Image: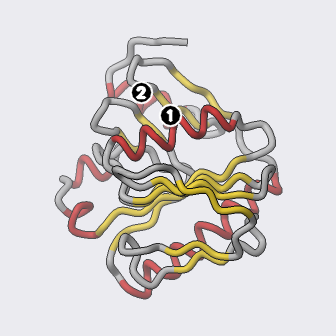
Amino acid sequence: MSIDLTDDQFFELCQRNRDYRFERTTSGELLIMSPTGSETGNRNIELAYQLQAWSRKNNLGIAFDSSSGFKLPNGAERSPDVSWIRRERWEALTPTQQKKFAPICPDLVVELRSETDSLKELQEKMREYRDNGAKLGWLIDRKNKRVEIYRPGEDVEILNSPATLSGEDVLPGFVLNLKGIM
């Protein structure tokens, strides 16, 4: 459904309906997502915990959970399951920009496919993140026991049943242990 809302109106809609996750496409289509199931929520928090622990230790950037929204350069407003932004990019935003849906594409975006998620839609979303500036994207597909890795200017890399994922040069030294997530 497409609804003509200003950025402030969309933010207010999200704040008044915290039981739902909203996203908006570049065409203004409003996407409404219900809360995840308990099992997926547990896997999401494990993912977020590992990233946050690494982020706190090295202080290179800021980690975000699935309730964080970002306004991408193409105008879409998205909420990855887990994301991370280099500190200098985050600090270049004004305090007002940081409080709402920050007008920035995270450096790392992670989507964890739940049972009800469309793989095709998640793949489109991952390409959108990549095309809007994400340096690294992981689509963790538990159903098919694989991970799709998105990088700028490269074909998608597919790993079957990996035990870990490397943060590469985007998150130097970070290794995501997929036990309990995959």
Which residue lies under the disc numbered 1?
14
Displayed quadrant of residue 42: bottom right
Question: Three-letter amino acid code at disc 2?
Answer: Phe
- Residue found farthest to the front: 155
Of residues 57 and 67, the one drawn nearer to the viewer in this rendering: 57
Instruction: Name the residue rendered at 49%, 37% in the picture.
Output: 15
- Using the rendered view, name the quadrant where residue 87 is placed: bottom left
Q: Amino acid at mark 1?
A: Cys
Query: For this view, does 166 lie left or right of residue 161?
Result: left
69 left or right, relative to 104: right
Q: Pinpoint residue 101: horizontal percent, then vertical percent.
A: 36, 43
Q: Are marks 2 and 1 in contact (CB under 8 Å)?
A: yes
Residue at which label 2 appears: 10
Q: Residues within 10 Å of mark 2 (few under 14, many from 20)?
A: some
Quadrant placement of the N terminus: top right
Q: Residues within 10 Å of mark 1 (few under 14, many from 20)?
A: some
Per the image, label 2 sits on a secondary structure element best described as helix
Real-space CA distance between mark 2 and mark 1, rounded to the nearest whole angstrom = 6 Å
Q: Residue at x 71, y 57 (%)?
A: 146
Q: Is residue 99 left or right of residue 93?
A: right
Can you tell which mark lies on residue 133?
none
Whole-percent x, y for residue 124 in the image = 53, 34
From the viewer's perspective, is residue 82 above or below residue 97?
below
